[in-house]
Each structure stands twice: as C-alpha cells, then as structure tokens.
Amino acid sequence: MPLQSVRPNIVQAIRAYRIEDLMNAAAQTGQHFLYANLGDAQSKQEVLDKIAESFMFPPHFGKNLDALYDCMTDLVHKAGQQPGFVVVLDQLPDNPRFDREMREQLLDVFRDAADFWAERRIPFRCFYSFR
C-alpha cells in the first residue's frame, strides 16, 4: 500500500506513485481521494477553476488562494470528523501564465492545509505532477 511509506502530512511530487494506486490506498484506508487533472489549465484562474470543479467546492468559492485554503481546511473541518485526505494535482502547468512562483504559491496553500490537518492529527497527503 503506497501510503504506508509516505508521511501523513506532506506535499510532494508524485514520482513513482501511480494515481490509481493512490486512489485505491485512499479507499482502503477510508480517506477522501481528491483528484484534479490540470492538463488543460494555462493560468492561475483556470487552475483554481479546475480544482474547484474537481473537488466539488461550493458555488460561493472565491476562486483565489485564500478561498482555496478555506475550502481545504475550515469548510471541511466544520463538516465533522474527517478520516484523512489523499490529494492529487495532476499536470500542473509550466508556462509564462502559470510560472514557478505561481506553482509554489499554490503548493504553499496545500502545505498550509497539511499543517492545519496535522494539528488535528488527520492525515493529509498531496501529490503533484508537472506537465
């Protein structure tokens, strides 16, 4: 099972892990599996739109990094006890409209979410890949 070898609260490159294996591991451990294929996204707004759509955020999602953090933490936390999360951000863009700095800002939101859940002793693992 791939999750046994991964710290419980981390954001890391997907590397040798297969998405299907991560999905199955999340199911076996009763954790939420959140997947966003960002292959068509070119800009920050398109990335946020695709994440919101894929993760089924509420219609009032503000489509900015602060709102993303709120949806990944407070909104879910208020919904009740959580079993854990396996998040996959597949094919993050690498272009002038979504450059390295923007990618790091996005990943920082997920790192902050991992810290939020770690404080509550809830596993939150986020894996990402680049196009």
Image (spheres, helix red, strand yellow):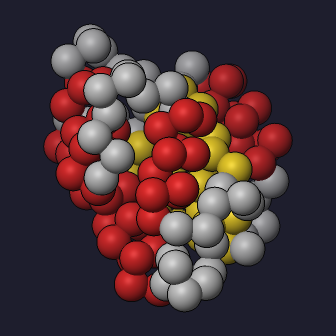
Give the side of residue 17 with respect to residue 86, left or right: right
Q: Is residue 44 above or below residue 101?
A: above
Which residue is depicted at the point 23% across and 39% down? Answer: 70
The quadrant of the picture occupied by the N terminus is top right
Q: Is residue 45 above or below residue 24?
A: below
Q: Position of residue 19 (x, y in %)?
A: 76, 48
Which residue is depicted at the point 59% across and 25% down? Answer: 29
Which residue is depicted at the point 32% across and 34% down? Answer: 61
The quadrant of the picture occupied by the C terminus is bottom right
Q: Quadrant of residue 90?
A: bottom right
Q: Quadrant of residue 44?
A: bottom left
Q: Position of residue 24 (x, y in %)?
A: 75, 32
Instruction: Say how many tags the image has.
Output: 0
Comparing 104 with 27, the one in front is 104
Q: Position of residue 104 (x, y in %)?
A: 39, 76
Residue furthest out toward the top: 80
Q: Position of residue 120 (x, y in %)?
A: 20, 35
Does residue 4 appear in this view? no
Which residue is depicted at the point 50% across and 26% down? Answer: 56
Give the side of residue 68 with respect to residue 13, left or right: left
Give the side of residue 116 with respect to residue 36, left or right: left
Comparing 113 with 36, the one in front is 36
Does residue 34 appear in this view? yes
